[in-house]
Each structure stands twice: as structure tokens, then as C-alpha cells.
Image (cartoon, rainbow, N blue to C red):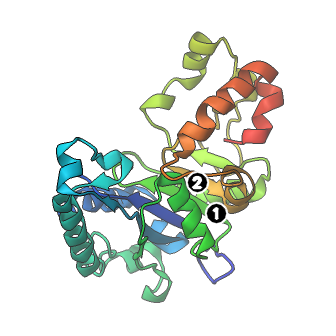
Amino acid sequence: MMMGDDGHHLLTILIQTSPIPSHPSTALLEALFRSFDKVKNIRVLAKIYILCDGYDEISAEEEEQGKDGIKRGRVSSDVAQRYREHLKLLRSKLDQPPFAPSQSYSKDSNCDDNCISQVEMIELPQRHGSAPAIKAAFDMGYVTTPFVCVAQHDNFFVSEVPLPSVLQTMMDNDWLKCVHVMSTATIDYVKKTRRRYDMDLEPLVRRNEGMLEYSLIPLVFWFGRTAISRTDYYTDFVLDRPLRLGDHLEELLGVKQLRDMQQRGPATAHPLWGN
């Protein structure tokens, strides 16, 4: 079985969450964790953290003036209370399915209970926003594995993901820095990129690379969706820049990568981005 420096973990998963209107319900996160059944050996290979951002609670007067905004982390006292209730409820459920694996998981994964990861929560006391929250998790020492996956609480796995093959292929190929899980934005991506940006990615597509049965298609835009990355890719490149409160990595890097690919050409520019 593939193992990391701590005996078994190769991957750290950071699931980002913050106040949303449906709280205190945990249904959204429960649906995400149920979708983990589609990711082979995820409970064995990965340490899993739910990264809970803080918030700015505004006054009733500010709320009346329309100065609230959940996406900006500025919430009313009612939303703040429901988020606190959500976190309390979530803590009480972590030892139950779907957050904890089913009793049959050990048998199905050929692993004893000691090597199956238990979900933990990282609760940030102040509001950070997406990118600074990720950096905070790194700075606090939660990411110690060679690979990291940053995921969103509403981005589910809808098809099978061969996680062991992905990790092994990345270990065998230093040039492969980041592998994004396919989404609607990347369906027919080679044709879509040629049509939209007049860029031909076909010469750069890698097929049957290592253990993977899927094609590796270079991206021209840095997406903030679920992806498996080298940890040093995050520390030395993705997060190695000034970050302001509320920043999102896709907003910081997406268009920047696209412009670089357009100006220098895919073959020259893409090795820097590696996604």
C-alpha cells in the first residue's frame, strides 16, 4: 500500500466552509462526504480537515443599511448564531457516517482501523476569506503530507476518481504539479480552448501517463475547484504572494495564467503553472 512519511498518509484534504443560508444544517457537507465513496482509498491515503472560516458580525443598523454579505464574510447576528450552531452540530457528528467511514470500510480497503483517517475541524477565530484561510492552515502546520487537496463544501465528486493512480503518477513525474478533477468547465477542453482562445493544447496532452487511464490535459486558466497538488507547489508558488482579506486564488491566478499562456504560448508558459 502507498504510504507517506507518517506511515500511511500521502494527502491532506482541506474542505473549505463558511456561513451559508442553510445553516445550522450539515446536509451540504454530508452530501460531500457521501461523494467520497467515489474516491478510491481516500480515507486511507488522506488526512481530512474541514476548514471553517471565521466571520465579521455586523450590527442591526449595518444590516438595515445593506452592509451585510455572506460571500464577503459579513453576517447578521442571526446568521452568525446559526453558523455557531452549525459548527457545534458538525462537531457532534464527526464520529458518525458519512463523516466517519462505515464499519465495512476497513475490510473493503484492506486496512485496519488505525490507518483510517478521522475527520477533524480547523476553526478560524477571525474571518480570512478563501485564500488567506488556506494559507492559515499551512501556517498552523496542518499540511505535512507531500500532496494537498483544497476542496469546497459544495463541490461534490460525481464520478470515480482513481486517487492511488493519480498520486503515484504525480510521484513519478516531477513536472506534474496539480491535477484538477474534471468539471463542466473542462469538458471538451481542448476544443473549447481552441475555439475561445485560439490555443492548440493537443500537442501537450499526455495520454496513458504512468498508472492513469485518463488523459492529462493542460489548463490555460487556474481554477479554484477541487484539485490534487504538490504541497510545495502551494507553498512555493500558489500561496507565495501577498494575500488580502477575502482574496480568492482563482481571482488572483486565473486570468494571470490565461494572459501568460496567450502571450508566451502554451508550450513555453504552461510548465510554470503545471496544472
Which picture quadrant has residue 58? bottom left
Pick the quarter of the image with the N terminus. Answer: bottom right
Residue found 46% across the figure and 86% down from its top? 112
Residue 210: % across, % down: 71, 49
- Residue 228's label in the rendered image is 2
* Residue 187 in the figure: left or right of residue 82: right
Q: Are marks 2 and 1 in contact (CB under 8 Å)?
A: yes
Residue in front for this viewpoint, 55 or 236: 55
Residue 206, label in figure: none
- Of residue 157 and residue 49, the one placed in the foreground of this image is 49
Vertical position of residue 48 compared to residue 190: above or below: below
Report the quarter where the C terminus lies: top right
Q: Is residue 63 left or right of residue 138?
A: left
Image location (x, y in percent) of residue 57: 29, 61
Taking the image as shown, residue 225 lies to the left or right of residue 52, namely right
Callout 2, which amino acid?
A: Ile
Residue 166's quadrant in the figure? bottom right
Q: CA distance from mark 2 to mark 1?
A: 7 Å
Numbered badge on residue 147: 1
SS type, badge 1? strand
